[in-house]
Amino acid sequence: MFTHVMRVIRTAFLVAATFAAAIHLHAAEPDRSAFDAFGGTDGLARVADRGIDRVLADPRIKDSFAQANIPHLKMELASQFCALLNGPCAYTGKSMKEAHAGMNVREAQFNALAEDFQLAMDDLKIPFTTQNALISKLAPMAHAINENGAGE
Ligand code: HEM
C-alpha cells in the first residue's frame, strides 16, 4: 500500500515537472513561425532585395535613394527583418531615427515604400498572412522614420 502511494505521488510529481518544463520552454522560445514561413534568412534576403529593387523603380521615392549604398542597405534590411521576426540575427545598423535623419520622410513616402514591399512579397508568392507578420512589425516604425512623426 505504502509503495503504491509513493508510486502515485512520484508519477504526479513527474507529470507536474514535465508540464512545468514544457511551459518554461514555451515561454523561453520566441515565435519563429513567420520567420520560417518566409523561408528563413535567405527568404528574407530575397524580400529585402526585391523590395529595394521595386523602390528604386518607383518614381514616387526613388530619388531619395540616389546616394545610397544599395548592397549595404539590402543587407541591413535583411538582418533587420530577420531580427524582427525572431530569427537568429542581430540588427547592427543605425537606429531608424538616425538612419533617416534629415531625409524629410513623410507619410506618403513611407506608404509608398510599404506598398513596394507588399508588391515585392506578392512577386515572391508570399502568402498574405505571412506578409502581414512583417508589415505589422514595420508599421510602428513610421514614428521614428518620418520627419514629423506618423500621420503628418
Ligand atoms: C518601414 C519603413 C523603413 C524601414 C524598415 C527602413 C529601414 C532602413 C534601414 C535598416 C536602413 C539602413 C541603416 C544603416 O545603414 O545602418 C535604412 C537606410 C535608408 N533608408 Fe530606410 N527604411 C524605411 C523607410 C524609408 C523611406 C520611406 C525612405 C525614403 C523614401 C527611406 C530611405 C532610406 C535611405 C535613403 C537610407 C540610407 C541608405 C544609405 O545611405 O546607404 N527609408 N532604412
Image (cartoon, rainbow, N blue to C red):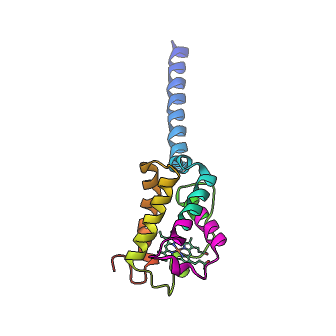
The residue depicted at 59 percent of the width and 52 percent of the height is 43
Q: Residue at the far left: name it.
A: 151
Q: Position of residue 42 (x, y in %)?
A: 63, 53
Between 43 and 94, the residue placed more toward the observer is: 43
Left or right: where 75 falls relative to 15: right
The secondary structure that dominates the magenta segment is: helix
Between 152 and 3, the residue placed more toward the observer is 152
Instruction: Reply above or below: 96 against 91.
Output: below
Split into 4 quadrants, where in the image is the C terminus?
Answer: bottom left
- What residue is rendered at 61% in x and 63% in y? 79
Range covered by the magenta-colored residues = 53-78
Residue visible at 61% across and 82% down in the picture: 67
Would you say residue 5 sits in the magenta stretch? no
Seen as rendered, the residue at the extreme bottom is 102
Asked if the stretch drawn in magenta spans residue 77, the answer is yes
Whether residue 43 is situated above or below residue 148 in the rendered picture: above
x and y percentages locating residue 36 in the rendered image: 56, 47
Residue 81 position within the rendered picture, expressed as x and y whole percent measured from the top left: 55, 61
The relative height of residue 64 versus residue 38 in the rendered view (above or below) is: below
The percent coordinates of residue 130 (x first, y second) are 46, 50
Count of numbered marks: 0
Q: Quadrant of ligand 1?
A: bottom right
